[in-house]
Image: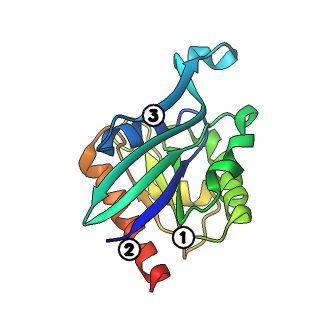
Amino acid sequence: MAAYKIVVTGPFNSGKTEFIRTISDIPVVSTEKRITTEDKGIKAETTVAMDYGRTLLDGETLYLYGTPGQTRFDFMWEILSNEMQGFIVLVDSTDTPSFPDAADLVNQFTNYMRVPYLIVANKTDLPGAAKLAEVRRGTKAGGDVTVMPCVATQKSSVRQVLLQMLQLLKPERA
């Protein structure tokens, strides 16, 4: 049985906190605070430091660390990436203007550490969701990068994403 540290990152409002809450076997440690900036019309709270959850999946323990999405809290990104074995870039598939921000996050996190990663198109169940090919283009993901759909409020969907991450991680341990 192995344990893996997975960072869940993505632009503001992409669903990182919900992703971790949906799958965590323990109560999620969350640092959500009321939004006081111009983003307060989008949602009521935002992560200011991190989210933390843990889940057991196929006999493997996954420690999930969610990053803040707002760049004013980007000092946490490098801290949270320390000793990560993989990362997930969550993208709101209904918010195409945020796709370049996701591409920037891929670059940022691969600069911290070269580890396997996924680009995950969240909110694919909503009207106006971009197709995976559009997400791939918008995030500048190469053909070797897995881009997959997700609905962060559905445990089975989040589970599929994490199983895919495990597939990428297991060859790394060998």
Name the residue nearer the viewer: 13 or 66: 66
Q: Specify the label residue 29 is tagged with.
A: 3
Question: At x 61% / y 37%, what residue is drawn?
Answer: 68
Residue pointed to by mark 2: 167
Marks 3 and 1: CB-CB under 8 Å?
no
Residue 58 vs residue 152: left or right?
left
Mark 3 or mark 1, whichever is nearer to me: 3
Residue pointed to by mark 1: 116
Residue type at numbered disc 1 = Pro
Question: At x 38% / y 74%, what residue is drawn?
Answer: 167
Question: At x 26% / y 66%, what residue is drawn?
Answer: 59
Within 10 Å of the Cα at label 2, are there few (<14), some (14-19), or many (20+) other Cα atoms? few
Rendering coords of residue 102 (x, y %): 63, 50
Colour setup of the view: rainbow
Q: Is residue 100 above or below residue 43?
A: below
Q: Element at badge 1?
A: loop
- Quadrant of the snapshot with the N terminus: bottom left
